[in-house]
Amino acid sequence: MDESLDTVLVSYDEETGVGTLTMNRPDALNALSAQLRADIVAGLRLLEEQNEGADGVALRAVVLEGAGEKAFCAGADIGGFSSDSAGGSSDRTHYDVIRDFPTPVIAKIDGYCLGGGLETALACDFRLATEDSTFGFPEVNLGILPGAGGVQYVTKLAGPAVAKELAMFGDHISAERAADEGIVDRVFDSDEFDDEVEEFVSGLTGQAPLAVQAIKKSAQMAVQSGLNEGLRYDRQLFVELLNTEDHAEGAAAFAEDRDPEFEGK
């Protein structure tokens, strides 16, 4: 499947189960216009449709990237700031849809990842970056704060001091420091980036997809709830997974000393 929305390119590889969303405003450093935000949501919905009528889980992972050689996403269009830019509308924003998407979403970051672009990456499950990428929250220079939870996200990942430094000074930090602070998961040499991301995603899609989706839910619950509530939730997920065909396949493969073939059922 290959689809072109106004500002997003959408593709799906049936063989690997990997969908790709490319934010396609390279001349504007993939800045988050209202159209781009809407197209990210529409693109994710198109990819989710691949599971309809499939025998198991068809869509195993989604890669979100930016077109061009300069930016993943340089933030929101300054002229288009509104409450919607920060998720202030009654509708679900692209940040919400990415965060709650059942399939893992991997941010493939090459270049600028700033403001709303960084918040978009933080909504993803994993952040992989080139060593030349830079990160930051420049909103303070406009008299505002990161409006889609950037300070909240970074506080949970790196602590309040790092979050306040990024948001109060508005400076850019390197990919190396972002990784040291836990904001980025992996940093790769630019020449090896595509291959490294492909290997990472391939490893993820080789796992039992229903278990992967349950683990994503569990991690989200851990962030949003207390320990006791989270433990109860994990027990519920565990019981549900015990009754899946993938669990039976995994147990059989272990007993037979072979690689399992998971189908998401």
Image: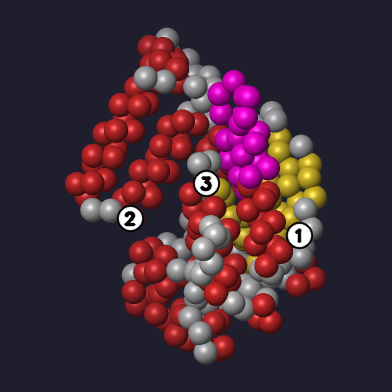
Magenta region includes residue 140: no
1 and 2 marks in contact (CB < 8 Å): no
| Three-letter code, disc 2 | Gln
Residue 13 percent coordinates (x, y): 71, 35
Q: Label 2, secondary structure: give it.
A: helix
Q: Circle 1: is it few (<14), some (14-19), or many (20+) Cα within 10 Å?
A: some
Residue 224 is tagged as 2
| Three-letter code, disc 3 | Phe
Residue 151 percent coordinates (x, y): 42, 73
Decide: is 3 above or below 137: above
Magenta region includes residue 63: yes
Which one is nearer the viewer's eye here, 168 or 55? Answer: 55
Residue 101 percent coordinates (x, y): 52, 46
Q: Which quadrant of the figure contains the N terminus? A: top right
Decide: is 168 above or below 149: below
Which one is nearer the viewer's eye here, 217 or 181? Answer: 217
Toward the top, the furthest residue is: 256
Question: Seen in the image, is 253 located left or right of residue 1?
Answer: left
Residue 57 percent coordinates (x, y): 56, 28
Q: Label 3, secondary structure: give it.
A: loop
Residue 7 is tagged as 1
